[in-house]
Image (cartoon, rainbow, N blue to C red):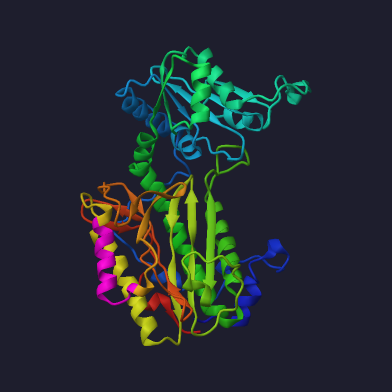
Amino acid sequence: MSVSRRHFIRNAGLGLAGLGLATKRLDYSSLGGKNESEKLLVSNPDHPEAATYDRLPLSWYKGTVKRLKEKVAEKGVDAILLQNRWNLVYFTGLFHSTTERPFYVLFPVKEDTVYWYHPGLDRDLVTSWWNTENEYYFDFLHAEGAFPDLGKVVQGKTVDLFEWVLKGLEKRGLGAKTIGVDSEFPPSKLKKAKKILPQAKFVDISQICLNMRIVKTKEEIALTQRAMDYFSKIHAFARDYILEKGTDATDFEVRHAAVEYGTDLILKDIKRDGKPHNAVGVSVGIGCRTGVATAYPHPNQFFHKKIEKGDALQVSGGVRIGGYGGELYRYYQILPRDKHREKLWQVVTDCVHIQEEESKAGKTCSDVAYKIHQHQVKQGVEKYIYHRPAHGEGMEGHQAPWLALGDYTVLEEGMTFSVEPGLYDPERGFGYNPSDNLLVTKQKGVLQGSVPYTKEWMILKL
């Protein structure tokens, strides 16, 4: 590459202006290298078409709730009460923060209505979105009759907010109806439910909700692909940054430079006015660790180490737009390397492609995991296996089903998974763990990232 290290450092700084550690923001377009790594990104004809929208439209959420109503009606359910944060976001499109404050939404099955029961601090989010009626408590813990926002400052009795919601259901005429809930009530809640609504029947519909979230629609897949396209460019930036700064850089610096670059890259394309319901579900979480820290699947130390020759290095993380996206990791080896590292790197890479080829509709999760683990053992690297090859991928990150020997879930088109057949050697102080967002199709799994799994990309000389 034609950029001098001094020129790169001067223009890129530390990528940490927000921490007061640099005086200049990253301006990647000004680099003489013109993003050489981006030229190596793979153009995959199997990739779904990327979305042009920043989030799913309200019509999608309304259609999804209609499908949910049809499914639960078969079980005789009269109304749906959701509390799980990921179900709330998935079925309503209302992105919100989860704290200790209870948040519920109610859908009567035979009505085109949506009722909210929520904390007062979210009242503007609720009333400016999809809302028929809403009731709110002031805050947690809520005192009866206390609404300082309405001029009512009282020290009333502490309100049991679960009982408050149950009374809300009673007011909606659901006292003797069948109500679908997205979590099984523990004995304490069941006792309260029988006290407030003795004639009501509660049915656990959590698996129905989860099954819908597991199989992505074409709109979700398109939005995921858009996020993964951005993520691939972020990886190209990180690779160039490592090549240019070399052993002058720390993994901490690479991480923050990539976060800043990726945030600027994505947000320049997101329509936003600072008000709720746009620029939602956007996250740019990039990780980097080098050296001994790569030898552990879930290390617990802070990453701040100079990159050194001979290091294994991982660039990782998750990128999402409108709540959709996934993981994309690459496992680098800074030269020199020995035959042992070369073998483990190759086995990991081979297993990525095994998962890619085996992840077709009709196979079970266990089938795919078996093929990967079988290959690892045949190659004599069983000592370095620490975990299953992958997990299902959703808004929350880890989502069922699991690519594990004990999971016999049948793969369906539209499911998405991580790609993590990693190997770790704590004794020698290194490990290699990949990831990607893999989409299940009829023929095979499609890796939605565009970053190559090649020596050219990942074996680096500094």
Location of residue 45 in the rendering, given as x and y in whole percent from the top left corner:
28, 59
Q: Nearest the camera: 432 or 445?
A: 432
Residue 35 visible in the shown view: no
User: Which quadrant of the view contains residue 256?
Assistant: bottom right
205 vs 193, left or right, is left
In the rendered image, which quarter is residue 433 located in? bottom left
Q: How many marks?
A: 0
Residue 208: horizontal and vertical position, in percent? 35, 34
Q: Quadrant of residue 160?
A: top right
Residue 6 at x, y percent in the picture: 63, 81
Residue plotted at (24% across, 64% down): 371
Q: Position of residue 192 (x, y in %)?
A: 53, 23
Q: Is residue 376 magenta?
A: yes
What residue do we see at 28% from left, 53% from top?
365
What's drawn in magenta, residue-wise?
A: 367-382
User: In the picture shown, does residue 208 fall above or below 324?
Assistant: above
| Residue 196 falls inside the magenta stretch | no
Whether residue 349 sits left or right of residue 157 in the image: it is left
